[in-house]
Image: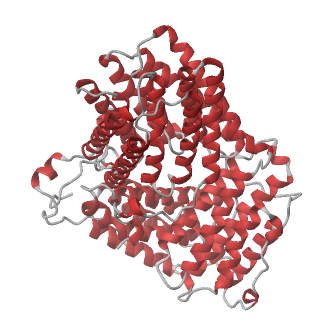
Amino acid sequence: MHPPELGPQNQIRPLVTLTGKRFTWAAGIRAALGVGIPFAIVTATLGLGDATFAALGGYAVLYAAKEPYARRGITLALVGVGLAVSLMLGSLAAGTALLYVPVITLVAGVATFLCGALQVDRPGGYMFTLVCAMGAFLPHQPDRVLERGALVLAGAAGAWLVSMSGWLVRPRHPEHLALAACFEALADFFAAIGDQPSDAARHRASETVHSAWVTVLRADTRRNRRTGEARRLRVLCRRALDLFQAAQLLAVERDRPLPPEIVDTVRALAGAVGRPTLVPVLPAVLADTETAAERTLRTALRAAAAAAGQPAVKEGEIIPGRRPSARERMRAAFDRSSLVPPTALRTGLGVGSAALAAALLPVVHPVWVAIAAGAALQGGNVVLDFGRVLQRAIGTLLGVAVIALFFHDLRPDRWLVVIVVALLFGATQTVIARNLAVGAACVTPVGLFLAAAGSPDAHVGDLAATRIIDTVLGLAVGLVASLVLWPRASASRLPRQLGRAIRAEAMLLRATVTGQIVDDRAWGSTRRAARRELIDLWSVYESALGEITGRHLDAERLWPAIVTAQRLGYRLMTAPETYRTDSPEPIPEDDLARLDAYVAELASAAEERRPPTLPELPDLWGYPVLRQHLKRLGRVIGRANEPMAARHLPAFVRQRILAPPARLLYGVRRTAGPDTGQSQRPARNRGPGETT
């Protein structure tokens, strides 16, 4: 059974509680200034009506908040241009449903796809959808399209300056945050060793180590590379990887928890990343080392503390690897195992359906319908989307209730609008990570104030009732789209992702049993590729658990295979440390050929959703644990792909809910070779009781 934190979550509890995350005060202040300053300047010079477009451009401040400043500047500039183009496209199509419905659909889908493919974090494509919908439901004025786009660019420029201003004070702060989060996750991994299954903690640690590596690599420009602080961060990134390897070795050999002093020391390294004077004193228990894993931990912890205590490093380690190009990321997004295409199509069609419904129904403010539908589809699967819909609906109701009770007859002055919009927008970004309902309650009056400011004779309270109706309609359309459009996208891709992970592990396995486990650049590249595949496998599984039609049929049955593949992969990653002193003899060529055939059959069976027909596994003298993992992986894949009794879903559901159409997503099917199946085209989701 998978860890409890991966299961479907209670959707009522988040309404009345706060998550374990902190209030993001810095993000709130940055959002208030990024929207408020351009809004105020344009209000003073051109008036409140034009200033609304500058405020929309200020939404760019929400992007790239965790990126290094070198990448952040480029990302924010592109986001600003994208927001301006989205508004202009919506403005050109305004007034005619035959035009603005396809335009909103196209912008929502393309923006979601590009943000997913280029790894632009949340809010992703949502703000482009919002800005396009705002332009589409304005009065049709073609002569003002360029002017509106220029105002959006001006607002985005103000947001760029606000977001980049931290470079003047703390130019390495994003990298410090990424490495601090890395050491925090490593401390949690060390704390989980011995007394409980540590698979979830290991995954989080592996993911944060990889994220820290990516963040430091993105900041590793030609100019920054020559500074002592940049060298220090590269060394710390390497030391974090060494600590992860030591934790993995300890997790294999220990059946009792580590001393709490070790966990506290690793956690204290997080504070020393940004302030070297806070480097911890190594605990005395490290001197009492008995096993090779404990000695590896002692060496890694000493090296990490030494690197953290230096304000700068004269000569540092160059982090191997390179930043993938935009073309490579786009190519990866079109892979059959990628979730980007179905997510983009679901979002585009869902928002377009909401815009069409708003055009056909007597809706007062159609823009709120389209925006609410886009917000409902940000979760990624049905369970998360339902939770977001419920919380946003409650939050909108609370926000409207406050306006109706206390500000019903208010005709806001223009400066009151500027101040209230900036403060509420900042408050939203401060609390939304801890409670989405409270964040929605804070952001709801923003739209009401802006709409009232655009209509001089309107009261804020007059718009309250229509806001509830329009928002609920949009949320309902978005939830229906999540239920109907590609409801099993993650579950159908999970077997293929499992096969990809096994194939990546096969490269590590081959290098291990042939005696080529030298911790060099080639081994590091292979290990990073396997780590990425294992992280993606876990993420796809998490997403599949939220798909109502696929959770019990496919995803949970594959959990034993997924966790076995995870344990095998991370065991192989520690091969240089495990076999450093006592390396077994390389296996013979004929045994290597049989091993390759065994692993290839495991991967093919996982991808094609069938029990494997396994050849004989060689003895693998010197590698008994690896052989046990391979044997277990074959058994659990076979059990996961056995036919199930047809009792889980009604027949009409099994017949009508199909896998994502491969022809629509990936083009015409290629000519079938001798080995067809999932490796050629995503197979149709088989219902319970159907044979493979």
Asked if residue 474 is positioned above or below residue 282 in the image, the reply reads above
Q: How is the image coloured?
A: secondary structure
The extreme left residue here reads 651
Residue 120 visible in the shown view: no
Image quadrant holding the C terminus, namely: bottom left
Q: Position of residue 455 (x, y in %)?
A: 44, 22
Question: What residue is at 60 percent from the left and 42 percent from the top?
Answer: 31
Q: Quadrant of residue 691?
A: bottom left
Q: Position of residue 608 (x, y in %)?
A: 30, 55
Question: What residue is at 89 percent from the left and 57 percent from the top?
Answer: 314
Q: Position of residue 600 (x, y in %)?
A: 41, 60
Q: Quadrant of residue 11?
A: bottom left
Q: Quadrant of residue 231?
A: bottom right
The extreme right residue here reads 314
Question: What residue is at 32 percent from the left and 40 percent from the top?
Answer: 468
The extreme front residue here reads 409
Between 420 and 630, the one lying in front of the other is: 420
Q: Report the side of 442 relative to 633 (left or right).
A: right
Q: Position of residue 22 (x, y in %)?
A: 57, 61
Total number of numbered discs in the rendering: 0
Between 347 and 341, the one lying in front of the other is: 347
Asked if residue 48 is positioned above or below residue 581 in the image, the reply reads above
Residue 496 visible in the shown view: yes
Image quadrant holding the N terminus, namely: bottom left
Q: Report the side of 690 relative to 282 (left or right).
A: left
Question: What residue is at 57 percent from the left and 64 percent from the top?
Answer: 206
Between 161 and 509, the one lying in front of the other is: 161
Asked if residue 466 is positioned above or below residue 20 in the image, the reply reads above
